[in-house]
Amino acid sequence: MPVLRIDGKEVEVEKGTNLIIAALKAGVYIPHYCYHPLLKVVAQCRMCFVKIEGVPRPTTACTVTVDKDMVVDTKDEKVKKLRNLALEFLLQHHPVDCPVCPRSGECDLQNFTYIWGPERKRYDGKRRLKGWIRVSEKIILFKERCVLCTRCVRFLRDFTKTGGLSVTQRGFLSDLTIFPEKFADGSKYSGNIIDLCPVGALVDEASSYLPRAWRVQRTLTHCPMCERGCRVVVEAWENKIVRVKTFDNMLDKAEESLYSQNKNLIQPAYSEIIGIEDIGAHSYDKLYTQDLIMCDIGRWEWRNFFFPKDTNPLSVRGGIKEEISWEDTKKVARTFLSYDKKAILVTPYATNEEMTKFKELAEKVDADITLLPPLEGEEDDILIKRRKAPNYIGGCNILGGVKDEVISKIKSGQYSALIYYGMGANKGSISQKDLRGDFIVIIDLRLERDDFVGVFIPATLPYEKSGHYTFEGNPKKINPACERIPYEIQLCDSLI
């Protein structure tokens, strides 16, 4: 393999590796806007200039592949001057509205300007005022913040094949233009242009007024909206989930080699992401698509799927609901043990650990147990899977899958006591209203009935608990973004 020597550091890389990726492997960050592993190289932002031994003038790193031994200098004075000029041109018409921009604290223009930017402004001409425009139902484009990297244009054109954005005119007048008949809503992956944008030009309207990057707590986990299990970052503030976005294993990792060396930057530290240790030592030899993008269902639909959500345990008796403490809830739930014919229904949203606990409980108290069927929907050949549940395969392995005979007995009232853990399951098969029994424990997002005797326990969301899901046959760890009582595990422990 060829050896790259960059800023005095040596590293072996696979032949044909892009120089920007090869530099990251050596722990050297080359600033860039337009380059991205998913997209075609266009070399138009002019930020990634480097000095290559044997080449008479600075060269754009994104257009270079490491095919032979190479010596590169990213700190050459000519290189620094070119970066300075590139940033000066970008800042001529920029509104410099960092205090109100949602990307403040994680913006490449902000951070690059601090490290390589001009010390003063020389342009006194008329500033372009472009305003904002809606790119889709959920995405807004602030044109004055745009650095014309065209990542969004290339992603919608080449990856999603929907188009909708294009650069019109030339030079000073260059502008991003949207075609109304081709709004970005035409693809289930359009939300990725928000994360692809290196500055605050493309904004998720639902997240535009959230706390700044340095105030939220970030957690690396896996998306539970289907059985693919894409790696995502969940952001929480004041113990509430506020945003789900992609984990860019190239750019987030780059923080170690750039931002951690500049202590005055307010970029959130890569090492502070909860669960980051789970990925271990990362290699830049290969960057996988599923690590760089996510579908719009995982990005936005969790709000409608999991919320609104009841938050307190309830005692239910004859139409009367009463809030009770968790300790009292466990005491009331022990009534379940006094009945002879018992059954337990478990959602495919339960973790492997929860399923194992419910199985142990069923074996100890001689109860029938079944997995609840998952929701199903459309799938594609990129990320989205047909089963809209993260742990159906885990449920088949641990609980024996969906047992139709048990579900039929429950509907016909052949059991005296039930535990129904139904969060996220297919309610068309069996819902809370189908349950028949003298005593019922319901674990779900919301209580949908009160004509029974028993207790209601609010379900713990996948983003609120730790454990493992068997995504597509592979167990993967999930990490909690918020602190919640693990009701399901504690309930089983109190009954065993």
Image (cartoon, rainbow, N blue to C red):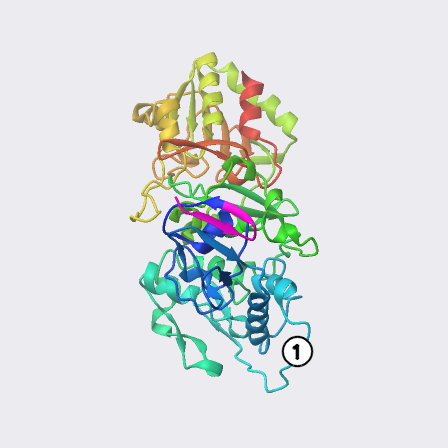
Is 13 in the magenta? Answer: no
Outermost residue, right direction? 264
Tell me residue 229's x, y (percent).
Answer: 42, 40
| Amino acid, disc 1 | Lys
Image check: 254 left or right of 3? right
Image check: 96 left or right of 346? right
Q: Nearer the viewer, residue 56 or 120?
A: 56
Q: Residues within 10 Å of mark 1 (few under 14, many from 20)?
A: few
Q: Dividing the image into 4 quarters, which one contains the C terminus?
A: top right
Image check: 437 left or right of 207? left
Residue drawn at point x = 31 percent, y = 43 percent: 386
Residue drawn at point x = 62 percent, y = 53 percent: 259
Query: Mark 1 highlights which residue?
Result: 121
Tell me residue 120's x, y (percent).
Answer: 68, 75
The magenta segment is 1-10
Q: Nearer the viewer, residue 170 or 442?
A: 170
Q: Nearer the viewer, residue 416 or 182?
A: 182
Quadrant in the picture for residue 76: bottom right
Tell me residue 101's x, y (percent).
Answer: 61, 65
- Can residue 413 be spotted in the picture? no
Tell me residue 180's x, y (percent).
Answer: 38, 74
Q: Nearer the viewer, residue 338 or 183?
A: 183
Q: Is residue 62 above or below residue 145?
A: above
